[in-house]
Image (tube, grey):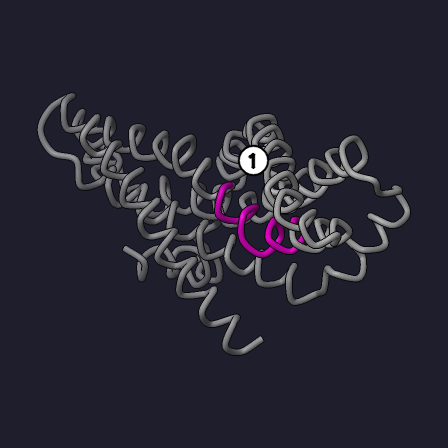
Amino acid sequence: MIKDVLFWMFIAPFKGKKIRWPATIEQAKFIGYDSIPIVSVIAFFVGMIISMQSAYQLEKFGATIYVANLSTVSTVRELAPLLTAIIIAGRSGSAITAEIATMKVSEEVDALTTMGFNPIHFLVVPRTLAMLVMLPCLTVIADFLGIAGGYLFAMTSLDLTSVRYLNQVESALTFKDLSSGLIKSFVFAGIIAINGVYQGFSAKGGADSVGLSTTQSVVVSIFLIILADLFFTVLFYSVL
């Protein structure tokens, strides 16, 4: 399936098989725009939680200024891409699987093939492209909101000024922190999209298989996301 998706995304357009951009934009709205509220709220509160937990330990050493360093770097490098991917896997990945699985058991996929439409080109490519574009965008939003949550806690509960906190954030955050988080989110997007459509196409039987495929899609996606996160964290730790 990965080979077919890559073919229809990068080779077929040069052979006259155009990407279905209206469907891609529609999927991008569902995956990205409609997910902004839940991603923003969770990222903001998680940023506050990380700052609280950091302050609890750092206050013992009189180093509360480093709350900005710890919460900012951990949010950008780890928590924002990971939590955003898990949210999207549960919200959009499951929806992709349920939609395709329903089409599969109701023989709509076979009908598309009979009418001369390739299911990968017609169903998978728009969802995969939308996921690859929108998940990194949501991760950037989660970065900002997570940092904002930590900032709000520091301003209301710690003896820090706004200028000191923001200067500490600026000195702590580097390009490799941002790039590592975005690289992770791009890989997570591919995992969610490919696994989602694969589980959908694997559905067999009746309506019960739709629920089974959807559940399996979420579980497998989260497992693979955490596994990939571990791999890239070790890689970036060793290389960067």
Left or right of 226 in this view: 136 = right
Give x and y (percent) for residue 83.
49, 42
* Residues shaded magenta: 71-83
Mostly what secondary structure, the magenta segment? helix
Q: Which residue is the extreme one toward the left?
A: 205
| Residue 145 or residue 149, whichever sits in front | 149
Q: Considering the numbered disc 1 on the image, is that residue within a helix, a strand or a loop?
A: loop
Q: Residue at x 57, y 46 (%)?
A: 80
Q: Is 66 or 108 nearer to us in this picture?
A: 66
The residue that label 1 is drawn on is 32
Q: Which of 191 and 74 is in front in this view?
A: 74
Residue for point 69% across, 36% down:
149
Residue 212 lies left or right of residue 62; in this view the side is left
Q: Position of residue 67 (x, y in %)?
A: 70, 49
Quadrant where the N terminus is found in the figure:
bottom left
Give the crowd class for mark 1: few <14, some 14-19, many >=20 residues within 10 Å: many
Which kind of residue does numbered mark 1 sit on?
Gly
User: Which residue sits furthest bottom?
Assistant: 239
Which corner quadrant of the image does residue 202 belong to?
top left
Residue 66, x across and y down, in percent: 73, 54
Q: In this view, does 206 lie to the left or right of 196?
A: left
Does the magenta run of residues contain 78?
yes
Residue located at (54% from left, 37% from top)? 28
Q: Residue at x 72, y 64 (%)?
A: 174
Give the residue at the far front of this rendering. Answer: 60
Residue 227 position, x and y percent, is 35, 57
**Can you say which quadrant of the picture contains the C terminus?**
bottom right
